[in-house]
Image (cartoon, helix red, strand yellow):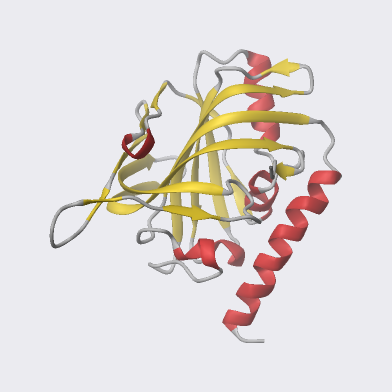
Amino acid sequence: MDRAGRLEVFFIYEAFAAERLGSMAGTKWNLEAEFIQSCNCDYGCPCNFNALPTRSNCEALIAYKVRKGKFGTTNLDGVKWAWGLWWPAAIHQGNGAGRVYVDPKATDDQKRAVEAITSGKNGGGVFTVFPSTFTTTYPARTARIDFTFRGNTSRFRVEGVGEVKSDDIRNPVTGEKFSGQILLPGGIQWTRGEVTSVDWWLRDPQAGWDMAHAHAAGFVALLKMNEKGPIRK
């Protein structure tokens, strides 16, 4: 099977595994959250369309602010966390690494819940798929997270670690703002995302990360998820 064929099979497996493993999750949970995403691909990110990444590898800094949620009996309302992500090639080729950064306003129980959700052991679409491609999961860190959700100009900052600034994509000739959405009915994290342009950076010496990108792929979305993945309504 050639590389393109392996990629297609992976994404078919990805959607199946996310749903299947979600049904096997140990703890029931749910959340409604504001979500801001960056990565190092060109606008729209070809990975969303079963294509290979723009620049041969994948790296990202993403963040969540829970509007309403629970993990088991632990209330997650208001909890903020970010996730640093890195792969040497395409995500499905593995050998990736991840680290979670949790805002210090989270209680110990809430921090443990975030670590459990992102561990790959409690279902939830992307929270099952991404960890399955990691070789290394670095211990979670506590870091202040400033999070502003306002459509295409959303942004967040992880103190001492990184920052993502979203903005409108601009027409390269006229400078006019571009507005667009991507619909992914079978998405593993969001099913409708606003496409943005992001400037972002992430530096974590322990992880060996020193990332910085301008005018890269970004998305903002409102998520509804549980241990089975995105709630598709």
Residue 229, image x and y in percent? 71, 44
> Residue 216, located in which quarter of the rendered image?
bottom left
Left or right of 222 on screen, residue 125: right
Residue at x-position 62% and y-position 21% = 68
| Furthest-bottom residue in this view | 1
What quarter of the picture does the C terminus occupy?
A: top right
Residue 152, image x and y in percent? 34, 40
Left or right of 215 on screen, residue 85: right
Q: Is residue 120 visible?
A: no
Q: Quick check: 148 above or below 129?
A: above
Nearest the eye: 142 or 40: 40
Residue 167, image x and y in percent? 28, 42
Residue 158, image x and y in percent? 39, 29
Q: Quick check: 41 above or below 198?
A: below
Residue at x-position 70% and y-position 47% = 128
Residue at x-position 82% and y-position 40% = 25
Left or right of 114 on screen, residue 226: right
Q: Quick check: 224 above or below 173?
A: above
What quarter of the picture does the N terminus occupy?
A: bottom right
Q: Is residue 211 visible?
A: yes
